[in-house]
Image (cartoon, grey):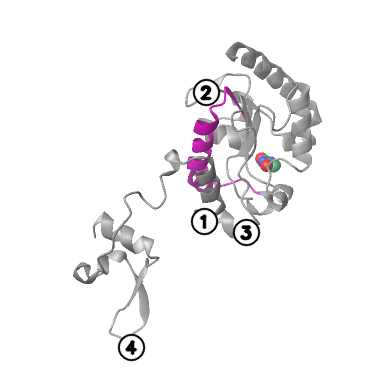
Amino acid sequence: MNERRKLILRTLGLTPLWRSRSGMSGPLVTDSAESLDSDNAPDIHLPEQPIQPDIQHMDWEQLAETVTHCNACVLRKTCTQTVFGVGDRNADWLYIGEGPGAREDELGEPFVGQAGKLLDNMLAAIHLKRGENVYITNIVKCRPPNNRNPSDSEARQCEPYLSRQIELIKPKLIIALGKVAAQNLLNSGDSIANLRGKIHTYSGIPLIVTYHPAYLLRALPEKAKAWKDLCRARELMQTLT
Ligand code: URA
């Protein structure tokens, strides 16, 4: 079946098609759109533009709307709502965590629980404030159940959204919060110990890895290392602006 016919069917909400395997009285089975008798398909006028632009061409509103209605992975089945991101859409600083927790799932905003309070303090320590020249989002936009880590495939499904957010924001510096964010952004299996202390890049944008604030809440002695990371980030930003 050609692309035009597939688009017609999708536009009309007619996929997947259902047909009887053995005449009208037989059991109904799903079938691919390939089986449609193309000669009998209605002649429908198609709009010039695709129904929904590709993610990489979306503006903020289209992107946010698409994320809200995303069902690409199983996470949407158990979360309350999607958590898109928060802050200044022209920020120099982009902070990326792993995925919403219980409180974020409830309120629809990233980092609003205990870890979020610590993140706000970490921002304040380098004279930054949520929403002011700072944007905060996550690798996945839906809460993984029981606060488990997002799987590789869930992170992959969500990646185009994050990638478009980054293209739109054009941050000067990305801070990856914790192992899951760092490994996904850097496409690396390295430990956080190896990833910290270096300047990486994501699509040409400098990226610094630090500990996740939720981890710091459990491992207070590591706070000194996180402080070092923040100071390094601040110094780097000074060279970038
Ligand atoms: N942890 C994250 O990684 N992201 C949030 O938004 C909240 C907690």
Q: Amino acid at mark 4?
A: Ser
Q: Main secondary structure of the magenta part?
A: helix
> Could you tell me if residue 134 is visible in this image?
yes
Tell me where the magenta segment starts and ends, as one range.
Answer: 148-175
Tag of residue 25: 4
- Pick whichever, 135 or 113, lies toward us: 135
Q: Which label was assigned to residue 181? A: none
Report the side of 186 relative to 87 (left or right). left
Name the amino acid, label 1.
Asn
* Label 4 residue near ligand 1, CB within 8 Å: no
Q: Return the residue at label 3.
A: 78
What is the CA distance from the residue labelled 2 to the residue labelled 3?
34 Å
Label 4 secondary element: loop
Amino acid type, mark 3: Thr
Q: CA distance from mark 1 to mark 4?
A: 33 Å
Q: Residue at x 22, y 72 (%)?
A: 40
Quarter of the image containing the N terminus? Answer: bottom left
Quadrant, the C terminus: top right
Q: Amino acid at mark 2?
A: Ile
Q: Which of pointers 2 and 3 indicates the residue nearer the eye?
A: 2
Instruction: Check if mark 2's residue and mark 4's residue have beta carbons within 8 Å.
Output: no
- Real-space CA distance between mark 2 and mark 4, rounded to the nearest whole angstrom: 61 Å
Q: Earlier in the sequence, mark 3 or mark 4?
A: 4
Question: Label 3 near label 2: C-beta < 8 Å?
Answer: no
Tell whether label 4 touches label 1 (CB within 8 Å). Answer: no
